[in-house]
Image: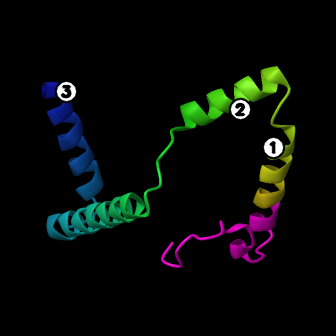
Amino acid sequence: MKLLTGLVFCSLVLGVSSQRWFSFLGEAYDGARDMWRAYSDMKEANYKIQTNTSINAREGIQKLLGHGAEDTLADQAANEWGRSGKDPNHFRPAGLPEKY
């Protein structure tokens, strides 16, 4: 508990050193509110969050079994499409609400 309290205190001191306390706390509140709204939207849309660990494990197993090469190529093509600045809705899943 002491370690957690120390980390929170140090992060507050470092984050506030160049700003006023009230503006920092207001921005922290706004950021937390944005995160909560995004989380609520994801729950409403019933999409699940996967960690990178599970995704990497799945890709590793596919590589061992010799599957997934076409998925990797499709993913790389989508990444290249996005970096080029083309329309991101090209890869939008069918039926996904416009809200997202």
Please tell me which residue is depicted at 69% across the width and 74% down the height of the picture: 89
Give the residue pinned by disc 2: 59
Q: Is residue 50 left or right of residue 73?
A: left
Please tell me which residue is depicted at 86% across the width and 44% down the height of the picture: 70
Q: Amino acid at mark 2?
A: Glu
Residue 24: % across, % down: 23, 64
The magenta region covers 80-100
Q: Residues within 10 Å of mark 3 (few under 14, many from 20)?
A: few
Give the residue pinned by disc 3: 3
- Do residues under tags 1 and 2 come within 8 Å of each other at their CB atoms? yes
Q: What label does residue 72 carry, if any?
A: 1
Does the stretch in magenta take in 85?
yes
Of the residues tagged 1 and 3, which is closer to the observer?
A: 1
| Label 3 secondary element | helix
Task: Kindly indicate the quadrant of the structure image that contains residue 8.
Answer: top left
Q: Is residue 63 above or below residue 89?
A: above
- Report the Cα–Cα distance between label 1 and label 2: 9 Å
Q: Is residue 74 left or right of residue 96?
A: right
